[in-house]
Amino acid sequence: MRNTTHQNLIPQSTGLLKISSLPVSRELDLKPLKFSLIIPTYNEGKNIQQLIPILVQLLDKILPKEYELIVVDDNSPDQTWKLALELTAQYTQLKVIRRDVEKGLATAIIRGWQVARGEILGVIDADLQHPPHILIKLWQKMEKGADLAVASRNVDSGGVSEWNILRRFLSRGAQMLGLIILPEVVGRLSDPMSGYFMLRREVLIDQSLKPSGYKILIEVIARSRIRWIGEVGYVFQERKTGNSKVTWQQYLEYIQHLIRLRLDLWQIRRFIRFGISGVSGVFVNMFILYLLREYVGLGLTRSAILAAEVAIVNNFFWNDRWTFRDFSKHQKGRIKTFRRFLKFNVICLSGLVLNILVLNLLYNLLNMNEYLANIIAIATVTFWNFWFNLKLSWRTTDNS
């Protein structure tokens, strides 16, 4: 093996699964490229030696000297990484990562994206079941302005070759399950199980990814800022060498992943933090009310108004620094912070009006117990405040 090949062996990255605007653990003087294609591997030594020359021949025609191929190997027993590294003497655009810390296809893809230099990121399987020539059609979709271009088995000119009935049933069943649990994500694609796609790096920047198992496309769509999706039909090919890595455990991981994404998109953790911040506001409100009444001597109405406003300031501080920190860090500056505070104030005050309306509706019109009515009113306002603050006070837009 030539010494020059060591320059093409990239150290494996660790830490958070986030994509930055600049590659991780790469030389700073390396210029950006138009395209980076990640090839995750495990025991694909024979296939990788066939695939790389085909990819180079295809991409040299449309992106000469503007692309890179990155093989991310999970320390394969057949030394796929070593065989790929030997190819770098002939194909200098090929880079290799040998992972001996983490395992799994989905995380391998993200680790590849992290060190990639491309403005557009892609992924293709190494087993030749993804026809390489489809890359040209995917790239054409990206040139037309797509944020994500997906190779689909379920559109015109797409198919699954020689799959048996059981495999077809499991694939469709997985898609239907995804539609039930995550309709707003899975419903955007004809083939959400596809592992063959390209996307713009910018839609993933600073997004926290939490993939599970071997399917990553649903994770990408759920957590990124993708607007336009282009789809290209392809026929999934049968494996010629090596063994399939699909197991029942991976189907279970897929279901667990769907459920976790559902909970994350429902903002359960954020809502709990919002509730804790609100509870702290109750104590602040009561303390300030006590001080103003007992030591300052203000009337009840003025004391209640001032105490409520101090509680709102308290709640805003904790929500801005904790509950919605991932949003506020993109909206730095006193003016933007003050704008968020004004919106928060208006929403909370309107919530107070809503509280009174719901309380009176339940107590006076429906004859509900006054304490139960108050609990329902508080719960209603809590959801009101959380939802509208999420959508109005803390949000990241192009003008934020």
Image (cartoon, grey):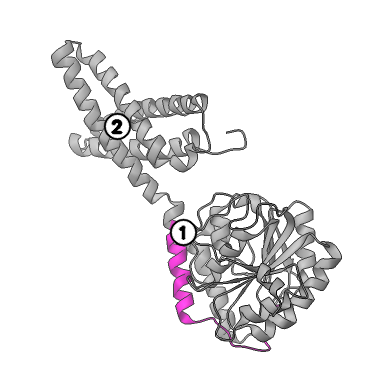
Is the residue 190 above or below the residue 83 in the image? above
Q: CA distance from mark 2 to mark 1?
A: 37 Å
Query: x%, y% of residue 369?
Result: 18, 37
Quadrant where the N terminus is found in the figure: bottom right
Circles 2 and 1, Cβ within 8 Å, touching? The answer is: no
Magenta segment boundaries in residue numbering: 235-262
Q: Write down the residue under mark 2.
A: 361
Q: Is residue 256 magenta?
A: yes
Is the residue 285 above or below the residue 397 in the image? above
Is the residue 267 above or below the residue 150 in the image? above
Within the image, what quadrant is residue 43 found in?
Answer: bottom right
Camera-nearest label, 2 or 1: 1
Q: Is residue 59 magenta?
A: no
Circle 1: residue type = Leu
Mark 2, other Cα within 10 Å: few <14 / some 14–19 / many ≥20: some
Instruction: Indicate left or right for 381 with 180 as reference.
Output: left
* Residue 365 in view (yes/no): no
Residue at 76 percent across and 70 percent down: it is: 134
Q: Which mark is residue 261?
A: 1
Of all residues, the one furthest to the right in this rendering is 61
Quadrant where the C terminus is found in the figure: top right
Instruction: Indicate left or right for 167 with 119 as reference.
Output: left
Residue at 50 percent across and 82 percent down: it is: 247
Circle 2: residue type = Leu
Residue at 36 percent across and 30 percent down: it is: 351
Q: Which mark is residue 224?
A: none
Give the mark nearest the N terminus, 2 or 1: 1
